[in-house]
Amino acid sequence: MKLLLLIFLVQSVLQTIYLPASQGAVQPMDVRLIEQTCKQTPLYDVCVSILKSDSRSSKADVTGLALIMVDVLKAKATGTTNYIKTLLRGNLKGDVRRGLSSCADLYNTVLEADIPVAIEALQKGDPKFAEQAANDAGIEARSCESSFSGHSPLTESNKSVQDVSSVAAAIVR
C-alpha cells in the first residue's frame, strides 16, 4: 500500500514539473511540418522563427500555419499604422508628412481589405485569393516605402511587413 502511494506521489510530482513545460512547446512532429512548410517560402528563417514561437503551431495544419502568419502580418501592419499615427502628431516637413499620410492610407487598405480577404479565403479553402491578398499587403508596404523622396522613417517596418507577407503568400501557395 505504501509503495502504491509512493508511486502515485512521484508520478504526480513529475507530471506537475514536466507537463507545463511541454504544453507550450512545439512537438517534434509539428516541428517537421513547420520546417517542411517553411522550406517552401523565400525566407525560411523568418518563417521558422515566427511559427515556432507561436504555440498555436503545435496543433496547426498548413492552413493553420498560414492563418498564424496572416495574424502576424496583421499585428505588424497594426503596429506600423500606430507608429505612423504617432509620427504624424509630430512636427514634420511637408514631404515627410505627405509620405506618412500616403502610408496611413496604404496600411489602412492592408488592415481593412487585404488581411480580412486573406483570412476569409483561408477559412473557405480558397488559397488563390489568400495568396493574392498576402501579396497585396507586401505591395502596399513597398508602395509606402516609395512614398518618401528621401529617407523613410518606416523602412524597417515596411521591410518586416513585406517579409511576412511574402512568407504568408508562399505558405498559402
Image: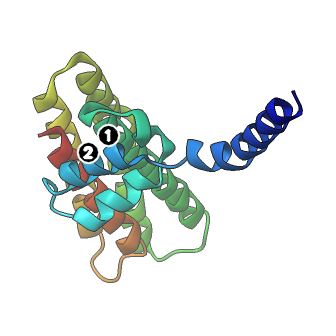
* Camera sees residue 48: yes
Badge 2 density bin: few <14, some 14–19, many ≥20, Cα 10 Å: some
Is the N terminus in the top left, top right, bottom left or bottom right quadrant? top right
Residue 56's spot in the image, x, y percent? 46, 38
Can you say whether 103 is above or below 64 in the image? Answer: below
Which residue is outermost to the top?
Answer: 124
Quote the CA–CA distance across marks 1 and 2. 9 Å
Figure quadrant of residue 158: bottom left
Q: Secondary structure at mark 2?
A: helix
Q: Is residue 165 left or right of residue 155?
A: left
In primary-sequence order, the first of circles 1 and 2 is: 2
Q: Is residue 157 left or right of residue 147?
A: right
Q: Residue at x 33, y 51 (%)?
A: 31
Residue 68's spot in the image, x, y percent? 38, 40
Amino acid type, residue under disc 1 in the picture: Leu
Question: What label does residue 112 carry, if any?
Answer: none
Along the viewing direction, whichever of 164 and 139 lies nearer the viewer = 164
Q: Secondary structure at mark 1?
A: helix
Which residue is outermost to the right?
Answer: 2
Q: Are marks 1 and 2 in contact (CB under 8 Å)?
A: yes
Can you say whether 149 is above or below 159 in the image? Answer: below
Q: Is residue 84 left or right of residue 112?
A: right
* Camera sees residue 161: no
Q: Residue at x 36, y 57 (%)?
A: 103
Q: Residue at label 2?
A: 33
Amino acid type, residue under disc 2 in the picture: Leu
Question: What label does residue 65 carry, if any?
Answer: 1
Q: Residue at x 44, y 48 (%)?
A: 26
Residue 94's spot in the image, x, y percent? 43, 72
